[in-house]
Image: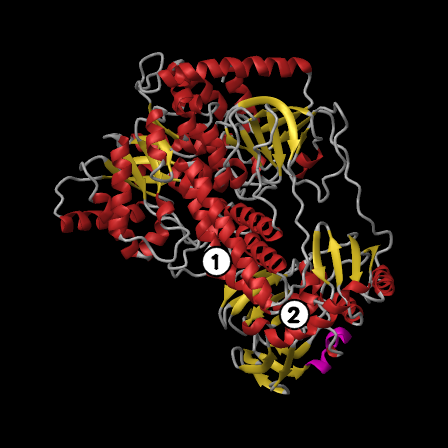
Amino acid sequence: MTAITLAAPLAGWAMPLEEVPDPAFAQGLVGAGMAIDPTVNELRSPCDGVVLSVHRARHACTLRAAGGAEVLLHLGIDTVGLNGEGFTAHVRDGQPVKTGDLLIGFDMDLVGSRAQSLVSMMVVVNDGFTVDGRTVNREIAAGEAAMTVHGGPESAAGTAAPAAAAAPGGAAERTATLRIAHGLHARPAAALVAAAKAHPGTVTILCRDRSANAKSVVALMGLGTTLGDRLTVRAGGAGAEGVVDTIAGLIDSGLGDPLVEGAQTPAPAAAPLAAPVPPAAEEDAGPPFAEGEEVLLKGTIAVPGQAVGTVVRRFSSRMRVAEEGEGPAVEEPRLRRALETVTAGLAESARRMPEHAAIFQAHRELLDDPELLDGALADIATGKSADWAWQRTAQLQADALAALADPRMAERAADLRDLERQVLAALSGKPPSVGLADLPAGSIVLADEILPSELAGVPAGRLAGIGMAHGGPTSHAVILAAALGVPTVVALGRQAERVPDGAAVVIDGNRGELHVSPPEDMLAATRTAVAARAVRREENRRLAGEECRMADGTRIEIFANLGRVSDAPGAVIEGAEGCGLLRTEFLFLERQSAPSEDEQYRQYQQIADALEGRPLVIRTLDVGGDKPLPYLPLPKEENPVLGLRGVRVGLREPELLRAQIRAVLRVKPAGICRIMVPMIASPSELQAVRTMVDEERAALGRAEPIELGAMIEVPAAALIADRIGAVADFLSIGTNDLTQYVLAMDRGNPYVASQLDALHPGVLRLIRQAVTGAAVHGRTVAVCGGAASDPMAAPLLIGLGVTELSATPAVIADLKAQIRGLRLEDCRRVAEAALATDSADEVRRLVAEAWPVV
């Protein structure tokens, strides 16, 4: 048996659990432990471990410590009723923590005045562990040794044996409505667990496609239940009928909490005919749309283009797996064999799509993540099945990634869910998934999220379009969809689940829309337009290599945004006149140590060689608290989007930035590269980087200067562009971040993603301000954000004075052809009118009226 010492998570008066003014804790129904009446307002980790869950009301969290002990930390009595008010969570589910790390902050005055008591509990809630050596009945300091926990996988596994043995005796199931205000928080969860533990067999609670072991307080709290949820009680073994009746009755009676009269699951309202339906507007998606019902769903543009087709639904439900296994000696080899099978499949996918081998290599690195494997093995050691252990660990890590503020990192959650599904399939002995290979021609697939593995082998012509209820525009699946030229819209919301199989739809990747059951004349017109565009695209690609000039001779440079070495050759074929944004994060993410200067130099040189002498603008590392690097010691942040990002990280970690600068300066021929610095908010930041560049250039003995530019992503930078232009050689506007900061909408939040539009007149006014400021010093202004790839944005950006657009390679040929038909005078006139509108929708109508073919 192992023993660990838990430190006091709070300073205050330590007391026995029996004295807590809550019978569920005082009687040991929740677990064994102690309590503290706090004198501080910060809850800190009592041990090294992993955060299993932070309650949605932020008043409690659970950690898994060494040996598998699950430690519930609960602030106050009846604090769940505050619904998070007065509490600030500083950690997320799945996050590793060290002893003393800040978990939750709370307003002592607010919570103390509105809760029954501030007395806070630390209890071990899973079986197989005992608690002794408690430090009680005195003042205790935060971090001081508080109690000792004994136990571990051997004893925990032993407690599971009776349930496993009893399982063959029978099975039963009942459903009941949860009619208590705050769901299964600690007290009602403990009451349910007490009833479940009286049964020798398995007891499981199911809610909204999720399941939990009814003998675990942590698992029940982790379901995230709310008032009106329907809970299914499922039991196995002798006496199963009796236990499901008992537990269903307890749920019906409130499990000790007051009942909310009339509580029931609300029925969602039907969407009005052809009216835009906001994404994620309802908790429940609702019934399918009626046959022929015309509906317009709004989402986020991911891959431009239009298509007409019939819907193929690929919404997935979480695979249900057996929780109890046959012991570590059986389950661990099963898991390792499954991982080997999936690894071989990733190698085959990389062989089929060599230009995107880096995506499948990233998946391979995720499979090799020791925390992922160790977490699953820890569960297996307690008697769980390989399937259950893998699913649980992968889900925890995916949920933690999905909660991150930065869209790029949040979208890696889809990669983990992909691997979760692949490994579970391998464990079940099923053949590898055929993904979307079996689609009929002209299919428009609707799904929660399309997974990269599903696109690896899709035959040409089968997949006409993709609509995702969730996901983001920079996910690996979207990158593959762009390579296939498949129009894609993401963040459509759960209303996409209501679209029936076989429905006729129009997907518009230029506007981020999905038209369900549109009129026949719209279907016909779109088919005609798509066919005409296909002919035009072939002609556009034939002329893509020519320089881009407007109809009146005005020169507009069209560059490409690149994210890896393999992107460069394809961008040149599409007509890119250079690279206006190289996202260097591909070199730094998903690894355990920073790339060396030599490694960076080799990668940059390969890209420069592929561009064949065209300009290469390299953005310095853009990571921060929202894009954590295991080897970069940055503090945890409450709001990473507003914290250490971009240049702020570079100035904090100067050696990391200097190594990158040296690598860029070494690229030949001298003068081909330019350096661009992200998240500049003041001239002094750029001047500090320029000083570094000059020092490193002198150290390398390089006589040739190098251009240094500033990204305009912060509203303040646009407003003082004249001051920044005095230090910068060029400016480049990152419309993705600029838009989210101007509109105060997190671009990773699916609830507002469809409203996040760079053509909002407020954003356009800041772009004009930046161009005007840059003109004071004769600086050119580029746009390298998502707006540069939007055909409706191009005339406006040019009209506002932008002379360089850096776009997604797939749209470059069409973008150049579009610009060749524009006149600067017309662009200026429409841009000026756009500045006087009230919304992005009005702006887009203006553009559509001025250039109907866009």
**Visible residue check, residue 121:** no
Name the residue tied to disc 2: 74
Looking at the rendered image, the quarter that the N terminus falls into is bottom right
Instruction: Identify the element where label 1 is drawn.
Output: loop
Amino acid type of the residue that numbered disc 1 sits on in the rendered structure: Glu
Q: Residues within 10 Å of mark 1 (few under 14, many from 20)?
A: some
Please tell me whether residue 95 is drawn above or below residue 345 in the rendered image.
below
Q: Judge from the rendering whether residue 310 lies leftward or rightward of residue 789; answer left or right.
A: right
Residue name at image x 52 percent, y 61 percent: 95
Magenta: main secondary structure: helix
Q: Residues within 10 Å of mark 2 (few under 14, many from 20)?
A: many
Amino acid type of the residue that numbered disc 2 sits on in the rendered structure: His
In reply to whether residue 483 is colored magenta, the answer given is no
**Quadrant of the image occupied by residue 313:** top right
The x and y percentages for residue 599 are 27, 49
Give the magenta part as a residue range.
17-25
Please tell me whether residue 56 is drawn above or below residue 742 in the rendered image.
below
Name the residue tied to disc 1: 637
Instruction: Identify the element where label 2 is drawn.
Output: strand
The x and y percentages for residue 588 are 36, 50
Which numbered marker is on residue 449? none
562 and 728: which is toward the camera:
562
**Visible residue check, residue 267:** yes
- Of callouts 1 and 2, the N-terminal one: 2
The x and y percentages for residue 625 are 44, 55
